[in-house]
Amino acid sequence: MKLAGQSRRTIEPAADGASVVVLDQTLLPFGVDWRRLATLEDAADAIRTMVVRGAPLIGVTAAYGLALAMRRNPTDRGLDHAVRTLAATRPTAVNLRWALETVRARVAPVAPSARRAAAWAAAGDLAEDDVRTNLAIGRHGLAAVRDVHARTGRRVEVLTHCNAGWLATVDGGTALAPVYAAFDAGVPVHVWVDETRPRNQGARLTAFELLEHGVPCTLVADNAGGHLMQHGRVDVCFVGADRVTATGDVANKVGTYLKALAARDNGVPFYVAAPGSTIDFTLADGVREIPIEERNEAEVTTMEGVDEEGAPRTVRIAPIGVAAANPAFDVTPARLVTGIVTERGIAPATRAGLASLFPDRTGGPA
């Protein structure tokens, strides 16, 4: 990622070799600060409070959290406790569980005295794999952007929801990976950035990182997407995912479903970009089977920002005493998804399509 013109990653091993530093995303875009995670509790808190967020980054942070836990208690009991603690932080993103089970499989067979080193190496491998995966997603998604440009002969207008750029990953991004690939390849591209209430990940994070990279973008209210599509101002939608079922249903930030409905009604291609680790081949019905995280109502009734002097402020925007519901995700049915962009290619949002790309996880196409 580009941060003040320098290449950084959202999570990096610290110089002491015994901790990691993460970019504190709760402070963006008004402040840039790095938080040191030295314990299991530090990692769990960073995930739970959304200091780090985005399914791939959550998974890698959890992996490092497990490695940090092995410094204190490398016993079987300590390993099980660490996995349970980290798994409970965010229930919807399947990458969290996948990363923990991947590291556990590497750590459990070795002697307790060797578990810290084994876990640290496994977490590092997951981080490097995430970067490679996102670059591949960008290459495959670039083809869809090039197709639009070849057909229209003008700048490609992309609409995205929430944040699935490099801030949601170790580096490179998922939904924004094709955008960065296109921009770097000289394909003219512009991004409509949904504000993404209630935490404003679009306004605070997506807009921030696109500006850092130099990609032209425009911030819009969440409910403006349908209007833009009706008037031919969106060529293609790219969103990320926190979980994809074996049949192609997609859980993503709440509001994604509405964008997919508007895209279908206006003939706009709607792509989901996600690594294979986000696909949960144990689930078939996303609406019924994917657990949807309910977050604190204060995220709905208040807003965070800075005042004219740049000081952070939280203000209430709803009447005192009003109840607020805060589902963090919704599920977009597979029938509304044009394709799922993975590191292995673009698959139809069907059981057979996903199985054709990941036969090693499904036993072959269904």
Image (tube, helix red, strand yellow):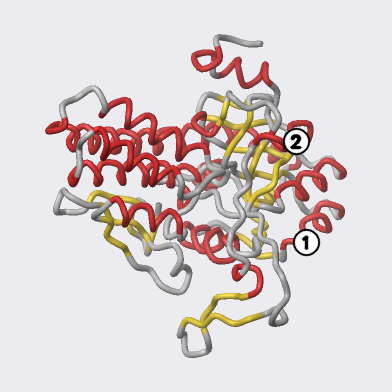
Circle 1 Cα neighbour tier, 10 Å, few/some/many (<14 / 14–19 / ≥20):
some
Is 6 on the left-hand or right-hand side of 228?
left
Q: Residue at x 81, y 52 (%)?
A: 229
The CA distance from mark 1 to mark 2 is: 20 Å
Name the spot of residue 16 as percent of width and height, x first: 14, 53
Answer yes or no: do the residues labelled 1 and 2 have beta carbons within 8 Å? no
Mark whose residue sits in front, 1 or 2: 2
Name the spot of residue 177 as percent of width and height, x first: 52, 43
Is 125 on the left-hand or right-hand side of 251?
left
- Which of the labelled discs sits on residue 223, or is there none? 1
Amino acid carrying mark 1 in the image: Asn
- Extreme-bottom residue of the structure: 309
249 above or below 8? Answer: above
116 or 127, which lies in front? 116
Q: Which residue is mark 2?
A: 333
Q: Residue at x 33, y 51 (%)?
A: 11
Amino acid carrying mark 2 in the image: Pro
317 above or below 134? Answer: below
76 or 255, which lies in front? 76
